Amino acid sequence: MCGWAQAYYKAQREKGKSHACPLRCLGHRWLEVLWKMWQDRTTHDGELHARNQQKHGSWVIQILTKPQVKTL
C-alpha cells in the first residue's frame, strides 16, 4: 500500500470510521488515479502523484510530512 493510502486509512479509522468506510473512499480515490492514467495514457508514477497532492494542498500529505511524536 502507498504511504498516502496508509495515512488516509489510519486517519479515517482514528475518526471512528468502520474498516469498510475508508476502504470504499480509498477505492474511489484509486479510481480517480486510474481514470487520469487512462486519459493521459500513462503508467502510475507514485512520485508524480505525491507532488500533485502536495501542489493541491492535500490533507493526507500534511499528515505524512508533519513530525511524528512518539509516545511511551
Image: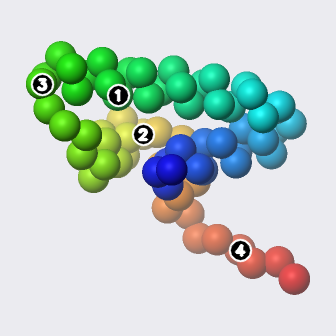
Rendered view: 25 above or below 13: above
Asked if the residue at tag 4 contacts the one at tag 1, i.e. Cβ–Cβ closer than 8 Å, the answer is no
Within 10 angstroms of label 3, few (less than 14), some, or many (20 or more) residues?
Answer: few
Looking at the rendered image, the disc whose residue lies closer to the viewer, 3 or 2, is 3
Q: Residues within 10 Å of mark 1 (few under 14, many from 20)?
A: some
Q: Mark 1 is on which residue type?
A: Val
Q: CA distance from mark 4 to mark 3?
A: 41 Å
Q: Earlier in the sequence, mark 1 or mark 4?
A: 1
- For marks 2 and 4 on the same chain, the one whose residue lies earlier in the sequence: 2
Question: Percent position (x, y) of residue 3?
Answer: 49, 54
**Which residue appears farthest toward the bottom when viewing the image?**
72
Disc 1 target residue: 33
Mark found first going from the N terminus, 3 or 1:
1
* Residue that carries the numbered disc 4 in the rendered image: 69
Q: Determine the secondary structure under disc 2.
A: loop
| Alpha-carbon span between mark 2 and mark 4 | 22 Å
Q: Secondary structure at mark 1?
A: helix
Spatial CA span between label 3 and label 1: 12 Å
Image position, residue 56 (x, y; %): 36, 35
* Amino acid on which disc 2 is placed: Gly
The location of residue 57, given as percent across then percent down, is 42, 39
Label 4 SS: loop
Disc 3 residue type?
Answer: Arg
Q: Spatial distance from mark 3 to mark 2, Cα to Cα?
A: 25 Å
Badge 2 density bin: few <14, some 14–19, many ≥20, Cα 10 Å: few
